Amino acid sequence: MERITEDQVARLVGFVSARIPETAPLPGEARRTAAALRLAADRQISAVIFHRNLPAEHAGETEMHAAASWNLLVALARIWRDHPEFPADAAVEPFDFACESPLSTTRHRDS
């Protein structure tokens, strides 16, 4: 997570948040879908921000959770990857999670 800059966090969070519609004007199933997407995004955003605001001596305790939350935000953003404002340089993943062993991670080579 240390290679993800504050600017990248702000741009990705802003992009994802702006794409999720307000629930009030939506009917039935669309409202529930938007509410679920907002809840999922907000929880991931909170986990990333919490981790980034921890003192360095405690950040190791939340690194894995924050990386997983960031990866989910990147995945959500990629739903709109064809959008002209898609922040491709912010949508980077600090870890790859293996499908066969999802609790194992592999750091990207440039981290």
Image (cartoon, helix red, strand yellow):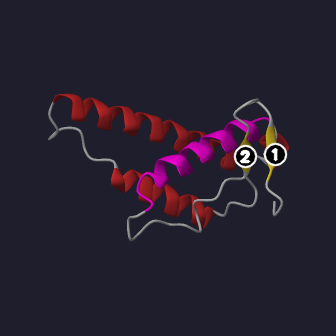
Q: In this view, does 26 lie above or below 11?
A: above
In the rendering, at what x and y percent does residue 108 appear? 79, 55
Left or right: where 39 falls relative to 26: right
If the image is split into quadrants, where does the C terminus sit?
bottom right
> Element at badge 1?
strand
> Element at badge 2?
strand
Q: In this view, does 80 lie above or below 30?
A: below
Sequence-wise, the earlier of marks 2 and 1 is 2
Determine the image quadrant of residue 47: top right
Q: Is 24 colored magenta in this rendering?
A: no
Label 1: few (<14), some (14–19) or many (≥20) C-alpha neighbours in 10 Å: few
The magenta span reads: 61-81
Tell which residue pokes out farthest to the front in this image: 100
Q: Give the residue number, with chain letter if any, for mark 2.
A: 96
Q: Which residue is drawn at 72% across and 52% down?
A: 94
Amino acid on which disc 2 is placed: Asp
Left or right: where 45 falls relative to 60: left
Depth check: give the residue in front, 17 or 110: 110
In the rendering, at what x and y percent does residue 10 appear? 53, 61
Amino acid on which disc 1 is placed: Thr
Q: In this view, does 19 lie above or below 5?
A: above
Q: Give the residue number, with chain letter if any, for mark 1.
A: 106
Q: Tell me the chief SS of the magenta region.
A: helix
Q: In this view, does 99 lie above or below 4?
A: above
Label 2: few (<14), some (14–19) or many (≥20) C-alpha neighbours in 10 Å: some
Q: Is 78 colored magenta in this rendering?
A: yes
Q: Which residue is drawn at 40% across and 64% down?
A: 82
Do labels 2 and 1 touch, CB within 8 Å? yes
Q: Which residue is drawn at 69% across and 34% down?
A: 99
Q: Residue at x 41, y 34 (%)?
A: 39
Q: Which label number is shown at residue 89?
A: none
